Image (cartoon, rainbow, N blue to C red):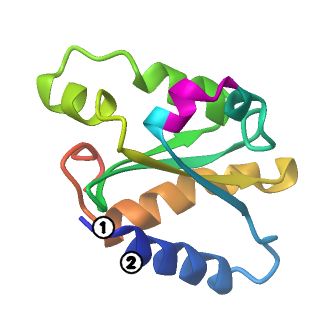
Amino acid sequence: MGTIGEVSKSIEEFFQKIPSLQSPTLAQFTLGELRDKKRLWAHHWANKFGIYLFFQKDQLQYIGRALSKTLAERIWNEETSHDPAWDAVIKDDDTTITVVSLNLEDAYWAASLETFLIARHPNLFNKRIS
């Protein structure tokens, strides 16, 4: 797993290893804010590609990527679950989401960043890669 601070350092490390890659745009908010403030869905990150991370009580729970769908579409899809453990994460208004949006020309790096972070920070919901 990892805390928000630990994972943020790993994101910085990834981007430092690839000098040609432009720095990403990061945004952070809680699920409660996302539900209450519909304007967040229209924010700069919503229609971009990249990765998104779910943290509950400052511990990493899940890392996902948005390549064929936008970040907003992928995060919205995560709201649907038939897994009681995941339901506990997505129904908690205090769950924090961090989005790392990439420029369109760098979007293909999202899969590499996701894999890099999962290897560095194994977590409960990313078992398929670790």
Residue 6 circle label: 2
Residue pictured at 29% horizontal, 27% vertical: 91
Horizontal and vertical percent for residue 19?
A: 77, 83
Q: CA distance from mark 2 to mark 1?
A: 9 Å
Magenta stretch contains residue 80 = no
Quarter-wise, where is residue 28 in the image? bottom right
Magenta stretch contains residue 36 = yes
Residue pictured at 36% horizontal, 35% vertical: 93
**Are the two marked residues, 2 and 1, in contact with CB atoms closer than 8 angstroms?**
yes
- In the rendered structure, the answer to whether residue 11 lies left or right of residue 24 reads left
Horizontal and vertical percent for residue 30?
A: 47, 44
Q: Which residues are magenta?
A: 33-38
- Relative height, residue 123 to residue 89 (above, below): below
Residue 121 circle label: 1
Residue pictured at 52% horizontal, 22% vertical: 76
Residue situated furthest left in the rendering: 84
Amino acid carrying mark 2 in the image: Glu
Classed neighbour count for the residue bearing mark 2: other residues with Cα under 10 Å, few (<14), some (14–19), many (≥20):
some
Magenta: main secondary structure: helix
Residue pictured at 70% horizontal, 80% vertical: 18
Horizontal and vertical percent for residue 105?
A: 86, 52
Residue situated furthest front in the rendering: 36
Closer to the camera in the image, 10 or 111? 10
Amino acid carrying mark 1 in the image: His
Comes first in the chain, label 2 or label 1: 2
